Image: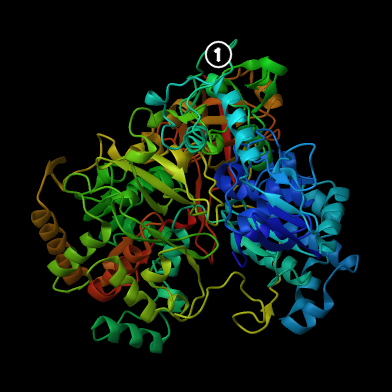
Amino acid sequence: MRFVSLTIDGRQVEVAEGTTVLEAARKLGIEIPTLCYDNDLSIAGACRLCIVEVEGNNKNLPASCALPVAEGMVVHTNSPKVREARKIILELLLANHPLDCLTCEANGRCKLQQYCYEYGVKESRFSGERRHFAIDDNHPFIERDLEKCILCGKCVRVCQEVQGVGAIDYSGRGFDTKVATFMDRSLADSPCVSCGQCIYMCPVGALTAKPSKGKGRDFEVTKVVTTCGYCGVGCQLALNVKDDKIVGVTNVPDSHNQGYLCVKGRFGYEFVDDPERLTTPLIKENGKFREASWEEALDLVAQKFNEIRAKYGPDALAGVSSARVTNEENYLFQKFFRAVIGTNNVDHCARL
Amino acid sequence: MTNSIEDIEKADVILAAGTNTTEAHPVIATRIHKAITRHGAKLIVVDPRKTEIASKAHIWLRPYPGTNVAVFNGLLNVIIAEGLTDDEFISQRTENFEAVAEAVAPYTPEEVERISGIPAEDLIAAARLYGKAKRGIILYAMGVTQHSTGTDGVFAIANLAMATGNIGREGTGVSPLRGQNNVQGACDMGALPNFLPGYQKVSDPAVREKFAKAWGVPSLPDKDGLKLGEIMAAAYEGKVRALYVMGENLMLSEPYIAHAEACLKKLDFLVVQDLFLTETAQLADVVLPAVSFAEKDGTFTNTERRVCRVRRAVSPRGKAKPDWEIIVALAAKMGYEMNYDGPASIMEEISRLTPSYGGITYDRLEKQGLQWPCPDRDHPGTKRLHAERFSRGRGLFTPVTYKKPAELPDEQYPFYLVTGRILYHYHTGTMSRRVKGLNAIAPCGLLEINPADASKLGIQDGEVVRVSSRRGSITPAVRITDRVAPGVVFISFHYREVAANALTNAVYDPIAGIPEFKVSAVKIEKL
């Protein structure tokens, strides 16, 4: 592998040939704003926000996400010229983007909002026709508001390149371009598998998690990183919590699941607050359950276990543990059967 | 998994057998997709159903249900015949190859075609592809294991990997994809009748002595306990009189539900600890309310042996308690004190007694998970097993021969029934069926049937039919699809209304004790 040396914002850096200027800058800890870039997706060069100034190039400001490094290159990522151009790009985006940040689900995590704040863009000097699309809220989990879409295409690419589904793509041309399903149907009537990878990728509020709607914005929730309770991939995810309730799930990018989740991991948490949850011990009497205290229920279990062990021996008792409880709980369960009851009759649902 | 999830993207050939990865392990399926589209990997799929990955496969082998062992032996037969074995690996790292070479000799492509229905030329092409791979990885799941010959299927896979030297290196290995969030951990922790934590044998006196001392008891039972299927049978016979079920819904997950119910009803005393009043909990004498993963601290161990933190995000609902607290309280009632400050201190005890978890502590897990074996605090964890040597020294080739499933279609019950999972639900649906959106997308259990069979029976898509086996009957709606071959039907086991396990056969693999969920015989009647 050959290495290339270049200068970014006055700092020298050596990177492998083929690296982009954006990646080289990130290596130096220099953040270049991006809307359409993701390090696990193909390069689109669509938003142009990552433009930089390269000394000796007086023709244009190239997009750093698509610009390979070259030996001796001198790059400025934040020069007045670059900042002015970025402001124009943001204004052009705002010219066709609703300014309903006050009620937008993406408020606080929207990258367009963030960059407008950073670059002092209050409104757009460009006025003209705006796009009008109906909100697609037929899907149980994903709401699409295409008026907010900035056409970065990350949703299209993640659906195709990572999920391998390709439920959505660009349709139309020029001003009429939009992200659509086949035959422009609702997302609910497409091959969508509800993984919600597109919501996570969306830099604005065009794609949002429907079950989270109105339940708390990014800055209002506490994010608790944990392990998914469904399949054995053990994806890392963040439960978004507000007022002791789970209101959503967000990604944990630096993980063995690369931040990706499936429909169950991302949306399958509602059962936690299902009204049918058991909230107190139950004892069956005359074929019917009645509520009991922990004290009473555990006394009864201990008494029955003791009686049966005394009468028939420890092997007359058995335990079925669970592949859904924690390691610590499985450990204690088998310890209970072996050390307290005195039998190895303990197994779990591994084979089911 | 012998290797890690990231290795899927490093393989040049992926052999996926009996795994509907896209639905059962969706995030791992993204790795398969990327391996193919970004790195040019080739995919071989062995599955009787045309799953999404079967559609993406370069070679799809569609065996009759229950013929895996013949197929794997056939692949090795061709690999040996064409000189594609890794002789250096075989001679330096393994033993007993000759016995396996002899055992697979009768499994010529023509013979395998006769047994499995897979065209000989497809088998040969697949064997060449895997045999020539520089880095070949095998992924498998319950489609291989849930047979009365499941263990043989796993032996046959191990034989293939060892014969081609595809083990212990990046992008290789034998990778069972574990179905439930902590099924790996439950096994690691000794929730098994023959093993104490870390697969330390119950039959080993030194092991028992170590644990007895640590747990402050004079001795521990020395006889292997009963496996789940045996527990049920013993309950029926009155040998097991009390059962304590924690977080498992046997009334939907056990084969031959009518029999499972009869077994549970024979018990003198049944305790069920769960989040909901499940079908199993309804039979209990005492029900103890537990909390979900979101309401407690702990760890899960995933399919790549990675121990990851579970963190409490919300408070326990009602008077429900974490399972560990309930066990501690019950033990105290029975005169045995378990003193723990919390899950972290339980893990301290686990790591003291379990060599493979020796270096696993909560402070190390704060940032990210650790893959066992992780024997001490300075050990970084293990991405790949068997890199230098196998745990037993040399890798042991195990000859296996094809045996028919316990029940095959006949005149009275002419269809193969295969059961499994779908994307939108999980296990017995206790959790996922209580999520509105998931139910909106997948509201009911559908019986997949081939268009040719549907037309013969005069059945329309969506029509409700009666499906019966020798053990029970259910009435699902049908989904007409070529995902299943003629003569084969499929239904998931998530739905209590059309419980697939009312039909399945309660026969078990003699070593693993796994039920034969993947093959039973049924008939279908128009209503």
Tell me the kind of residue under disc 1. Phe
Tell which of B174 and B302 is nearer to you: B302
Q: Position of residue B12 (x, y in %)?
A: 78, 58
Is any atom of residue B488 visible in this view? no
Numbered marks: total = 1
In percent of width and height, residue B502 lies at 45, 40
Q: Which residue is mark 1?
A: A133
- B257 to the left or right of A194: left
B403 up-or-down from B113: above or below: below
Image check: A346 left or right of B134? left
Coloring scheme used: rainbow
Give me the chain letter of mark 1.
A
Q: Report the residue at 26% width, 62% height from top.
A: B324
Give the residue displayed 12% in from the left and 58% down from the top: A300
Residue B233 appears in the figure:
yes
Q: Nearer the viewer, residue A205 or A16?
A: A16
Q: Residue at x 27, y 50 (%)?
A: B291
Q: Quadrant of the N terminus of chain B?
A: bottom right
Q: Secondary structure at mark 1?
A: loop
The reply, left or right, for residue A263 in relation to residue B284 is: right
Looking at the picture, tell me which residue is in the foreground, B343 or B192: B343
Residue B389, horizontal then vertical, whole percent? 66, 82
Asked if residue B174 is positioned above or below residue A163 in the image, the reply reads below
Give the image quarter of residue B499: top left
Q: Dot 1, how many residues are within 10 Å of its Cα: few (below 14), some (14-19), or many (20+)?
A: few
Question: Horizontal and vertical percent for residue A257?
Answer: 55, 52
Q: State the residue at coordinates (77%, 56%).
A: B13
The quarter of the displayed image where residue A44 is located: top right
In the image, residue A262 sits, relative to residue B360, either above or below, namely above
